[in-house]
């Protein structure tokens, strides 16, 4: 996968949580910078900061997260902000969103949900700096979702292409069923079983596409029980 890593500012004053999140995000292909209090976060977010998204805790020493957010929006800075906080009440969520937050995730949260929401924000705001997503002979153009296998067009449905994009964006990492559901089906009233059906169809199309071209099945969607799905290949990603 050819990418320029998205730059993320992680504003979190609890060291264990910051280390956990920062490690996971870096493993997911992102460049992470840390701020441990509100004053440091505000300094990091001055004009020209270059961040693609901000993960912002609200309960911070020095200056609280809402004040950091307010100052950011007062500067007409539209960088996506995902609030992470133990304040889970509806009034608190409404206040944060009304002040310019793009999304809100109450603690404790599942890491896969955070990654899914962050990817949605990055794509929505055009902050995913990709050229082409590749795995061996499989290639996807992120601008229009066009997919080629061994240089030939592979016809996928919109949902199949969305699922494939998520897998391609997480090379050599399992993607949970919950993350795929959040990214592909969003708020639709479908259960997790829909992900299994979707993956089955995608898997068959990859197999059939290779067979029609007289090629071995070099790209497979492998299920890791209890963990999720991952693109694999007998000969590696290439």
Image (cartoon, rainbow, N blue to C red):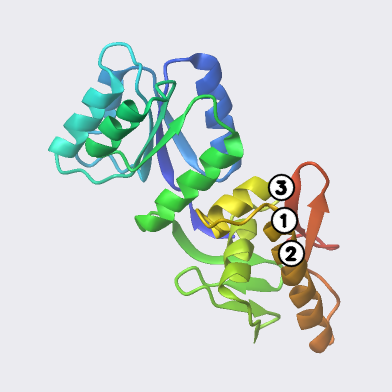
Q: Upstream in the sequence, badge 3 or badge 2?
A: 3
- Residue 195 position, x and y percent, is 69, 58
Residue 226, percent from left and from top: 80, 41
**Which numbered circle lies on residue 45?**
none
Q: Is residue 118 left or right of residue 96?
A: right
Find out whether the residues at labels 2 and 1 contact each other: C-beta distance under 8 Å. Answer: yes
Q: Is residue 202 left or right of residue 234?
A: left
Q: Residue at x 51, y 55 (%)?
A: 186
Residues at marks 2 and 1, CA–CA distance in whole angstroms: 7 Å
Kindly state the secondary structure of the residue where label 3 is placed: loop
Q: Measure the alpha-carbon separation of dots 1 and 3.
A: 18 Å
Image vertical order of residue 64 relative to residue 53, above or below: above
Q: Which residue is mark 1?
A: 193
Residue 197 circle label? 2
3 vs 2, front mark: 2
Q: Which mark is residue 174?
A: 3
Counting from the top left corner in percent of width and height, residue 103 is at 38, 41
Circles 3 and 2: CB distance less than 8 Å? Answer: no
């Amino acid at each position: 996968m050819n990418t320029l890593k998205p730059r993320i500012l992680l504003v979190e004053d609890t060291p264990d949580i910051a280390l956990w999140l920062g490690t996971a995000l870096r493993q997911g292909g992102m460049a992470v910078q840390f701020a441990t209090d509100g004053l440091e976060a505000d300094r990091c977010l001055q004009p020209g900061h270059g961040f693609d998204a901000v993960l912002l805790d609200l309960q911070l020493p020095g200056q609280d997260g809402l004040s950091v957010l307010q100052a950011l929006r007062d500067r007409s800075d539209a960088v996506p902000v995902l609030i992470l906080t133990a304040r889970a009440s509806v009034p608190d969520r409404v206040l944060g969103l009304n002040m310019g937050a793009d999304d809100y995730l109450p603690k404790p949260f599942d890491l896969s949900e955070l990654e899914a929401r962050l990817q949605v924000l990055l794509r929505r705001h055009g902050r995913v700096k990709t050229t082409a997503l590749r795995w061996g002979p499989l290639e996807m153009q992120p601008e229009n979702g066009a997919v080629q296998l061994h240089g030939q067009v592979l016809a996928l449905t919109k949902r199949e292409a969305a699922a494939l994009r998520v897998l391609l964006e997480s090379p050599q990492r399992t993607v949970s069923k919950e993350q795929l559901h959040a990214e592909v089906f969003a708020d639709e009233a479908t259960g997790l079983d829909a992900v299994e059906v979707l993956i089955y169809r995608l898997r068959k199309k990859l197999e059939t596409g290779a067979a029609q071209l007289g090629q071995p099945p070099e790209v497979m969607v492998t299920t890791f029980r209890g963990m999720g799905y991952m693109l694999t290949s007998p000969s590696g990603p290439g």
